[in-house]
Image (cartoon, rainbow, N blue to C red):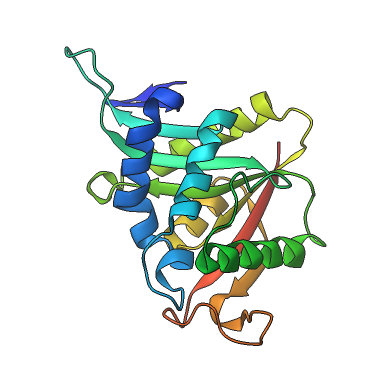
């Protein structure tokens, strides 16, 4: 992986598990609408977090770190992206109703965009940069690193997709050449009982974008 200024980009290994967990808890989940807008509250559930951490073992978690000039210790993680094959996104047992709701919603998103897109594909479902380091093209680098990972880990897949829940991410992905193939409002989704699942963010959307690998 390459570097940009004092930021380096690497693929996470099992040795990075604790810092990946810290990054997810600190600056990903607190701003992730599927977590914060859920009817049960804004906290991430243990099974959701464990599922994200499981992608470390798949070799598909990319990190942006601060360079450490002399200490020899890994630098602080200031950005993270996670992806994997679209048909292999669940790696832990579902233990909470909230995570079950999120998994069902993401399946609905995937099915809604399948007519316009390529399946299976490599899907990037997490992209986050620490607030103090935004505006430095770290997100762009992380997306580009994810595309490299996709080609290396999943050479059989011909397309790269991303689910954007933030307008900044949507704009970035479109600048990188991804085309929109689906757009769904969180408040349109209903569970099997016909009840709203995400009721804390009236204007929340999930935009699915795609490009060829």
Q: Residue at x 79, y 30 (%)?
A: 156
| Residue 67 x, y percent position in the rendering | 26, 23
| Residue 157 x, y percent position in the rendering | 76, 36
Which sits in the foreground, 40 or 36? 40
Q: Quadrant of the C terminus?
A: top right
| Residue 1 x, y percent position in the rendering | 47, 21
Q: Residue at x 64, y 79 (%)?
A: 191
Total numbered labels: 0
Does 34 sit above or below residue 29? below
Which sits in the foreground, 1 or 109? 109
Does 141 sit above or below residue 11? below
Q: What residue occupies the far left of the structure in this picture?
A: 70
Does 93 sit above or below residue 148? below
Q: Residue at x 76, y 64 (%)?
A: 111
Is 212 positioned to the left or the right of 100 in the image? Answer: right
Is 100 positioned to the left or the right of 49 in the image? Answer: right
* Residue 75 in which image quadrant: top left
| Residue 83 x, y percent position in the rendering | 58, 42
* Residue 31 in which image quadrant: bottom left
Q: What residue occupies the far right of the structure in this picture?
A: 115
Whether residue 20 is visible to the viewer of this picture, yes or no, is yes
Whether residue 143 is visible to the viewer of this picture, yes or no, is no
């Amino acid at each position: 992986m390459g570097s940009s200024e004092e930021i380096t980009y690497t693929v996470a290994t099992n040795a990075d598990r604790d810092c990946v967990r810290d990054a997810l808890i600190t600056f990903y989940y607190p701003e992730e609408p599927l977590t914060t807008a859920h009817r049960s509250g804004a906290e991430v559930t243990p099974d959701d977090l464990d599922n994200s951490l499981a992608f470390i073992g798949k070799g598909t978690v990319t990190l942006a770190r601060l360079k450490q000039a002399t200490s020899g210790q890994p630098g602080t993680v200031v950005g993270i992206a996670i992806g994997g094959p679209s048909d292999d996104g669940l790696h832990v047992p579902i233990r909470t109703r909230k995570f079950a709701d999120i998994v069902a919603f993401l399946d609905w998103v995937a099915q809604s965009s399948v007519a316009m897109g390529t399946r299976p594909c490599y899907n990037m479902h997490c992209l986050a940069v620490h607030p103090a380091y935004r505006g430095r093209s770290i997100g762009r680098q992380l997306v580009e690193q994810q595309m490299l990972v996709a080609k290396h880990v999943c050479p059989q897949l011909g397309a790269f997709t991303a689910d954007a829940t933030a307008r900044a991410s949507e704009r970035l992905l479109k600048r990188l050449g991804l085309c929109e193939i689906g757009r769904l409002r969180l408040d349109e989704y209903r569970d099997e009982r016909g009840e709203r699942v995400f009721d804390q963010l009236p204007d929340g959307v999930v935009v699915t974008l795609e490009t060829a690998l």
